[in-house]
Image: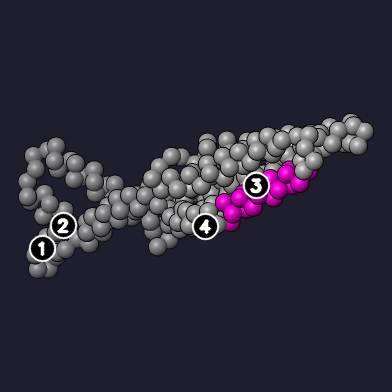
Amino acid sequence: MSKRIKAVAYIEAVIFALEMLGFLFKNFKPIDVMNYLFSTGGPSDAYHFQWVGVTAAVALVAFIFNQVWERRKMKADLKSKNSIIWLDTVRPILADLMVASIDAQLAKYEFEYNSRKGLPQVSVAELEKSEKLFEDKLSSLDRSYSLLQLYIPESESTANLLYKIEGLYGTTKSNLEKLENVKSGTPDEPLALMAEKNDGTDRIKFLIKDELIPVAKTYFNKEWVQATRGE
């Protein structure tokens, strides 16, 4: 249906609605409707169907249906758009958290190793560089975790995902403390640091690959399907 025909149909619908209201607020009589829908005259002096009235009635119904449908479609489209934007925002942050967990572990090991060796084996510049690197990685870890807490609401559908995120973050922070608490001044200190670093890294990789990623994929796939449907 062209825009011009739609416009004419809508005008007829409005006119019909106004005339119906006029019937209601006047002395309504059944004959009023009969006169609107039928006319007399012509050779047979009988009732003849007025298609204009029927067209206006159909146009009114179509107009109301179209308005309701367009409103519902607009709400669904808006919800779908917002959901897709949310998904495009959260997924990279979650990926940043995974990367930052391993990076913080490795940077902490390097800083602990250099600080324990001390001068003159490690220069002041090298020690400061490793310390700055660890601080940056730790800041990235904390930032990603905080953003996920803000973006992902607590609900039944997100409970498992939030639990896995909390598990990865908590384990990483615990690993960093273990590296810092490795006993110093012993002959096997470098080996102890290396062992703790390797164990911690393996724990983090397991949590990412076998725990967090499967849960995140299931959740995000479900959210994507609902977003494309406007649900």
Q: Give the distance between the C-alpha atoms of the residues marked 1 and 2, in whole angstroms.
A: 9 Å
Is there CB contact under 8 Å for labels 2 and 4? Answer: no
Q: To which quarter of the image does residue 89 belong?
A: top right
Residue tagged 3: 200
Magenta span includes 44? no
Between disc 2 and disc 4, whose residue precedes?
A: 2
Q: Residue at x 40, y 52 (%)?
A: 231
Q: Is residue 192 magenta?
A: yes
Instruction: Please name the residue that numbered disc 1 is placed on.
Output: 47
Secondary structure of the residue carrying tag 2 is: helix
Give, as a three-letter code, the residue at label 3.
Gly
Q: Amino acid at mark 4?
A: Pro
Query: Quick one: label 4 or label 1, which is nearer the N terminus?
Result: 1
Circles 1 and 2, Cβ within 8 Å, touching? The answer is no
Question: Residue 3: image x %, image y %?
Answer: 43, 57
- Asked which secondary structure carries label 4, the reply is helix
Instruction: Classify residue 201 as left or right of residue 10.
Output: right
Of marks 4 and 1, the one in the foreground = 4
Distance Cα–Cα, label 2 vs label 4 = 66 Å
Q: CA distance from mark 4 to mark 1?
A: 73 Å
Picture coordinates of residue 72 (x, y %)? 37, 49
Q: For the residue carrying disc 3, how many other residues have a C-alpha within 10 Å: few (<14), some (14-19), or many (20+)? A: many
Asked whether, in this view, residue 35 is left or right of residue 97, the answer is left
Disc ID at residue 214: 4
Q: Secondary structure at mark 3?
A: helix
Q: Nearer the viewer, residue 171 or 65?
A: 171
Q: Earlier in the sequence, mark 1 or mark 3?
A: 1
Amino acid carrying label 1: it is: Tyr
Which numbered disc flags the more N-terminal residue, 1 or 2? 2
Tell me the distance, in whole angstroms, between the alpha carbons under discs 1 and 3.
92 Å
Q: Which residue is mark 2?
A: 37
Where does the magenta region start and end? Answer: 190-209
